[in-house]
Image (cartoon, rainbow, N blue to C red):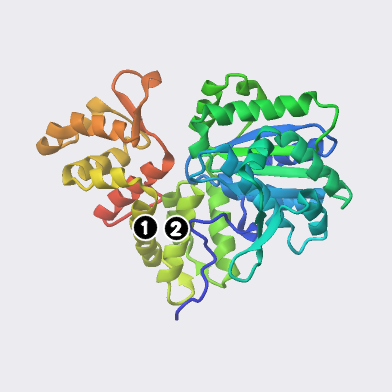
Amino acid sequence: MTHENSPFTPGYPVPIEFFVGRKSQIDLLLKKIISASTGRLQIAFLCGERGIGKSSLAYFVKILSERNHHFVGIHNYLGGVTSLTVMVRRILDNLLNESVDKAWHEKIIQSFKNHVKRVGLFGVSLELDIDPKDLDHTVNNFAPTLHKISDQLKTAEKKGLLVILDDINGLASSAEFAHWIKSLVDTIATSDKNIPLCLLLVGLEERRQSLVKLQPSLSRVFDIIDIAAWSDDESKEFFSEAFSKVNVDIEQKALENMVFAAGGLPVMAHEIGDAVFNIDKDNYIDGDDAYKGIFNAADIVGRKHLEPQVFKAIQSKKYRSILKKVATKPFGFEFQRKEVIEILGRPEEKVFDNFLTRMTELGVIIRSPEKGKGYYKFRNLLHYLYFLITAGKTKNTISASK
């Protein structure tokens, strides 16, 4: 039997019906939405490591803010964006297109008057038709622009704006962006015109630290909301709910092994779920389906999610052998140099220090001085899980009982 549509969405924010956990973070963000609706500016930084589900959580809160709190949400994916003008243009273009087919569409069009044009093959998309000098002015005077927009939205019975700045890697190292954020916050805070705005930045913790280093005052501006890995129960709920939606049953042991391999990382869970779903032929996931899917998912993760320079470096047989031994017990996420040396073969031992240097340069591992001399740990859970699974593939087994 061939399945038609996988319930898993690797590489994309999770559909709302499959959203799992994060109750405390959702509650915190919704409190900010409610506070912003009274005219009190709210700004938060949603932190978490790669693949932890930051974008999915931001998107989920956007939907809740619209459904339950009468907000207008704008989720801006800023991958590759390095300038303020491109960022602001994208925010406003997204707002225009978010309004299409909505009751408040004409109110937004009125905000921009004659500066809107239809684009695309069938003219179904909107974008600003604005002189570069005027756009620069908008960048430097973004608070008044937001105030004008929010005033128009009030007449459409909307209570505020949620502006999400996601994937800010290209902007986080920009002093201009750091100072722009601080200036926007200060301008709104000291204005006698209330703007019901919740600004949510989404990124890695190191991106937040980069912005704070460039503009130290931001350390007091950002309310930090951290996302941790799913618990085993949350992972089980995710897999069970997704498979049940397409009428596929799961053997308990197979489910446990999928949960173990996913390690609480949503991006890994989606890749594993999708790979297992595509292998299954009888609407019943057994141990063999799970094993094959887990190992297939590891190959996909290696190609899709590992940085090209990392993937190239680990093609060395000796490096891969070392990584597989490091990733499995008794070491796990964190390891000590002298303990690893004890289990290495002579050829691996000869290159081990070069391996540590290279993997540290590439950001696969980092030193862990708080544990003591010679301690290292994987920089993120995604790298660790990839090598854990590939180690299991070499042994032709992976089990939650490990």
Q: Is residue 91 left or right of residue 41?
A: left
- Helix, strand or loop for disc 1: helix
Q: Position of residue 16 (x, y in %)?
A: 65, 57
Residue that appears at 53% across and 26% down: 175
Crowd band around label 2 with a 10 angstrom C-alpha radius: few (<14), some (14–19), many (20+): many
- Residue at the far bottom in the pictured view: 1
Crowd band around label 1 with a 10 angstrom C-alpha radius: few (<14), some (14–19), many (20+): some
When the figure is inspected, residue 205 is found, relative to residue 63, above or below; the finding is: above
- Residue at the far left in the pictured view: 346
Give yes or no for contact between labels 1 and 2 (Cβ–Cβ under 8 Å). yes
- The residue that mark 2 highlights is 271
| 156 or 316: nearer the viewer | 156
Q: Is residue 301 left or right of residue 320?
A: right
| 195 or 298: nearer the viewer | 195
When the figure is inspected, residue 157 is found, relative to residue 340, above or below; the finding is: below
Amino acid marked by disc 1: Ile
Query: Which corner quadrant of the image does residue 40 belong to?
Result: top right
Q: Earlier in the sequence, mark 1 or mark 2?
A: 2
| 334 or 105: nearer the viewer | 105
Residue that appears at 79% across and 49% down: 111
Query: Which corner quadrant of the image does residue 292 belong to?
Result: bottom left
**Label ID, residue 300:** 1
- Helix, strand or loop for disc 2: helix
Residue that appears at 62% across and 54% down: 19
Amino acid marked by disc 2: Glu
Q: Position of residue 335 (x, y in %)?
A: 32, 30
| 337 or 401: nearer the viewer | 337
Q: Position of residue 229 (x, y in %)?
A: 52, 42
